[in-house]
Image: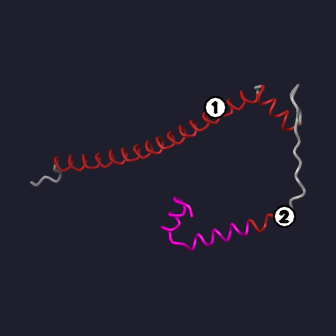
C-alpha cells in the first residue's frame, strides 16, 4: 500500500509557509521602523532649529534691555541728545546741480567700455602697473 501522506514533505511545506510568513512580518516591521527613524530625525532637526531660534530671541531680549539699545532707540526715533552733547545738522548743498554729475558718470561708463574692449592681459597690466 502506498502512503498518501509523506510527513517529511508536509514538514517541508509547513516550514516554507512559516518562513514566508516570518519574512513578511520582518519586512513590515523594518519598513515601519525606517519610517519612524526618519520621522525622529526630522523632529530632532526641527527641535535643534527651534532651540537656535529660542537662543537668538533670548540674546535679542537681553540686548533690548541694555542702556545702549535704549539710547540708540531714543536717538533714532525721538531725536534725543545726551546731556552735554551737541547735535550737528548737515544740510544738503543745493549749489551742485544734477547736470554736473551726469557727465562724470558718462566718462566713467566710457572708460569701462574701452577697458572691456582690451584683451585680458592688457587689463591686468594696467591694473598692476597703471598707465
Would you name the residue on which mark 1 appears?
55
Residue at 81%, 30% in the rendered image: 71
Bin the neighbour count of mark 1 within 10 Å (Cα to Cα): few under 14, some 14-19, many 20 and up. Answer: few
Residue range (magenta): 105-131
Q: In the visual, does 107 lie left or right of 123?
A: right
Query: Is residue 117 highlighted in magenta?
Result: yes
Residue 116 locus on image (x, y percent):
58, 71
Q: Disc number at residue 98?
A: 2
Residue 13 locus on image (x, y percent):
23, 50
Does the residue at mark 2 contact the one at mark 1 (Cβ under 8 Å)? no
Q: In the visual, does 118 lie left or right of 81?
A: left
Bin the neighbour count of mark 2 within 10 Å (Cα to Cα): few under 14, some 14-19, many 20 and up. Answer: few
Question: Of callouts 2 and 1, which one flags the residue occurring earlier in the amino acid sequence?
Answer: 1
Quadrant in the picture for the C terminus? bottom right
Residue at 17%, 47% in the rendered image: 7
Q: Secondary structure at mark 2?
A: helix
Residue 117 locus on image (x, y percent):
57, 74
Query: Is residue 127 highlighted in magenta?
Result: yes
Q: Secondary structure at mark 1?
A: helix
Amino acid at each position: 500500500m502506498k502512503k498518501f501522506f509523506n510527513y517529511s514533505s508536509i514538514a517541508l511545506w509547513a516550514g516554507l509557509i512559516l518562513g514566508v510568513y516570518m519574512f513578511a512580518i520582518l519586512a513590515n516591521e523594518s519598513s515601519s521602523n525606517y519610517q519612524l527613524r526618519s520621522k525622529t530625525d526630522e523632529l530632532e532637526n526641527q527641535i535643534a532649529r527651534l532651540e537656535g531660534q529660542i537662543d537668538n530671541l533670548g540674546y535679542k531680549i537681553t540686548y533690548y534691555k541694555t542702556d545702549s539699545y535704549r539710547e540708540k532707540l531714543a536717538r533714532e526715533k525721538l531725536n534725543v541728545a545726551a546731556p552735554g552733547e551737541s547735535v550737528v545738522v548737515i544740510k544738503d548743498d543745493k549749489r551742485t546741480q544734477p547736470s554736473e554729475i551726469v557727465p562724470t558718470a558718462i566718462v566713467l561708463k566710457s572708460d569701462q567700455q574701452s577697458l572691456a574692449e582690451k584683451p585680458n592681459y592688457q587689463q591686468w597690466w594696467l591694473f598692476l602697473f597703471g598707465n
